[in-house]
Amino acid sequence: MNNKAIEVLKQIEQTDFETGIPEQFSCYANETVELLKKNKLRITAAESLTAGMFQATIANIAGASNVFDGGFVTYADEVKVQLLGMDPALIEQYTVVSAPVAQAMAQLSAQKLSADVGVGFTGVAGPDPLEGNPVGTVFIGVCNNKNNETIVKEFHFSGSRQAIRNKSVLCGLVLVQEII
């Protein structure tokens, strides 16, 4: 990953998102859609803790239909298996809040919809810990099938449930830009 992306991810992790997405980060959704358009790439996602927020953020940008056909909200483990075709043994071995599951969510969502870029979000938004993971633990996987590149990052966000979800969406956008 380039230094700018690493720095932005660090800033997002440390910034207070309690009153919404800070102004300095408001351009990322538009930039991401424009980059996808410029590179003629289609994107999809499988979201657990963000429950569709990432896809809604993409779809809020005018012209998103040029790069986005749809995706998945896979909140429950069984739905990850049913909709994405995830191997339940993967969840059993690593737990749902893990890098391998985030990566599989990204890859399986892209495969199911023949998208170039897939994004997977799994984690703990709160209020309670999950499977031994503290609130704020988030894994985001991003794959680009055009260049066979995959990034999976672990985050430890602080803040309210909504702040953790907003930070997750924003970091997903940064990672998509990085992988294009």
Image (cartoon, grey):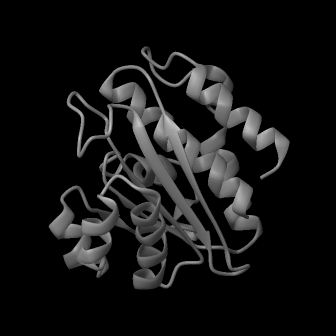
- The residue located at (63%, 80%) in the rendering is 145
Q: Is residue 146 above or below residue 46?
A: below
**Nearest the camera: 25 or 37?**
25
Q: Is residue 50 left or right of residue 114?
A: left
**Nearest the camera: 165 or 59?**
165
How many discs appear?
Answer: 0
Q: Position of residue 13 (x, y in %)?
A: 57, 28
Asked where in the image residue 101 lies, by quadrant, the reply is bottom left
Q: Is residue 47 left or right of residue 10?
A: left
Q: Position of residue 50 (x, y in %)?
A: 35, 45
- The residue located at (26%, 76%) in the rendering is 89
Q: Is residue 160 left or right of residue 13?
A: left
**Nearest the camera: 59 or 51?**
51
- The residue located at (83%, 42%) in the rendering is 3
Q: Is residue 164 left or right of residue 73?
A: right
Of the 4 image quadrants, the one containing the C terminus is bottom right
Q: Is residue 2 above or below residue 128?
A: below
Q: Is residue 156 above or below residue 31?
A: above
Q: Position of residue 132 (x, y in %)?
A: 27, 41
Asked where in the image residue 7 lies, by quadrant, the reply is top right
Asked where in the image residue 70 lies, by quadrant, the reply is bottom left
Q: Position of residue 160 (x, y in %)?
A: 34, 21
